[in-house]
Image: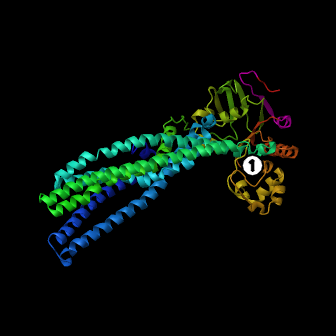
Amino acid sequence: MRPLDPRLLRYARSARGYVALTAGLGVLTAALVVAQALLLARALGRAVHDGADLDTIAPLVAGLAAVVAARVLVTGLQERYAHRAASRAVGELRDAVVERAVDLGPRHLAAGHGPALVTLVTRGLDALEPYFVRYLPQLVLATTVTPGTLLVVLGLDWISAAILVGTIPLVPIFMVLVGRLTQGRSERGLATMQRLGAQVLDLLAGLPTLQALGRERGPAARVRALGDAHRRATMGTLRIAFLSGMVLELLTTLSVALVAVGIGLRLVEGHLDLVTGLAVLVLAPEVFLPLRQVGAQYHAAVDGVAAAEQAFALLDEPRPARGSLPAPDLATATLRLDAVGVATADGLAPAGLDLVVRPGTVVALTGPSGAGKSTAVDVLLGLVPPDEGRVLLDAPGGVLDLADIDRDTFWSQVTWLPQRPVLEPGTLAEVVGGDDASRARAAALTGLDAVVATLPGGWGTTLGRGGVGLSVGQRQRVALTRALLSPAPLVVLDEPTAHLDASGERVVLDTVRALRDEGRTVLLVAHRASLAACADVVVPVRSTAGQVAA
């Protein structure tokens, strides 16, 4: 990533105004730095050389105080708007990354990018804040204050300016050398953090199964090893940051010392007046200060820069084509899969699938694991584009291809219950939805009313993310109740009886029958014969391995 990557301004619009504001404040800071040096030099020169009293130099001291106050004000404004712009820009970039990941579909996430994406949009992009707050302002000051003060020094004393011009290039050379080494370490640190995040997410997802098998402590050594690797990578970066900071400080100190020695010798010989010498001596550190700060703050921002590179890599991937036609009413439209096949590492799954889902019917997809039943559902919902065949909607107004339809108008008519229900945080009543009367009727059908009776807060019980606080069966009842209350004409249930006992299975069967009685269309992914038996149409799904459901 370049010091100011144009892609950042393209994907994070809040950064545009902030960069313009920072540039304006940088020019103002340069003018204040020069004014402060000249006023200080003139005041000291009159007091030391001319023997002026306090009343004579009072206007200069007052002007100096005003300039210092103005610098404090400018710095405060910079800090204030930097934090605001950083929060907004990081939020916009995070939204863009999540939106693009959704556009790329579940196939992209299933390829191993999911855990890394979670780490990127949380801790990874949060590291961009030091880039906005610390690094970028110093970068702007290096392009305004350094040239401005150097030109003023050139006008005052060309010898000192020549010394500064000869020593300034040493600073960016060392910055580049150290920056290249640190960049590699930061990228490795981010990769380690992403592996650690993926390991922890997988562990949390499979923790109930591991506990049931008595293996919950098995991954502890691996998680500890990844944590140690991330700690070593982080400490290595900090070590380089401290060493590089020491090198830059030593280099700039020696450069300013050369200027000071030259000024002192010429003052003694009478070749330079005191006011000019003091002004140059005050301005010399200001020439190097922005460059030193750029080098020092680079290490604080490099983690965010590495995360931004990954975000830009995802955002630069081409967006899948999306249709613009409004979806027909699914209460009267027939959905068809015409010879659909989806390519996997082992072949097509499903392969050559023909499926007709008529309004008001219950259709079940059956077949062995790996045949492509859940993938067929993803294709029908427009989440995964088929590699072979088409998805058609046969409506009274004509036949439409799903690829030509605006997915938002299509998804708004679908209720989807995946194998693991997704429950948002909130009270139980907020998660289920509906009014009190309809909620009570639906809960009585799914058996959720018995669950509510055991909860201390009843419908006001607060659920954590993913339904934390409820068992797997109870979460399934919550999801089924929400599906009953949804007005969507198409309900998709992906193996709804998975992880359920016999009583839970009866609840699912009763829910499916209730949905059919309401005239809604139901698409099931069924492993159990009892679930397939309640369907009007059973469609076997096969893969290129030749597996066909019984």
Q: Residue furthest right?
A: 502
Q: Looking at the picture, which amino acid does disc 1 mark?
A: Ala
Residue toward you, 413 or 426:
426
- Check the picture and name the quadrant holding the C terminus: top right
Q: From the image, tell me which residue sits under label 1.
A: 479
Residue toward you, 201 or 258:
258
Q: Is the residue 539 above or below the residue 89 in the image?
A: above
Residue 125 visible in the picture: yes
Is residue 476 shown left or right of residue 424? right
Please report the residue visible at 23 percent of the width from the left and 54 percent of the height from the top: 259
Is residue 67 shown left or right of residue 136? left
Please report the residue visible at 14 percent of the width from the left and 71 percent of the height from the top: 50
Please report the residue visible at 42 percent of the width from the left and 51 percent of the height from the top: 297
Q: Position of residue 42 (x, y in %)?
A: 19, 67
Residue toward you, 299 or 351:
299
In the image, residue 543 lies in the stretch drawn in magenta: yes
Q: Range of the magenta residues?
A: 528-546
Q: Position of residue 169 (x, y in %)?
A: 29, 44
Residue 117 visible in the picture: no
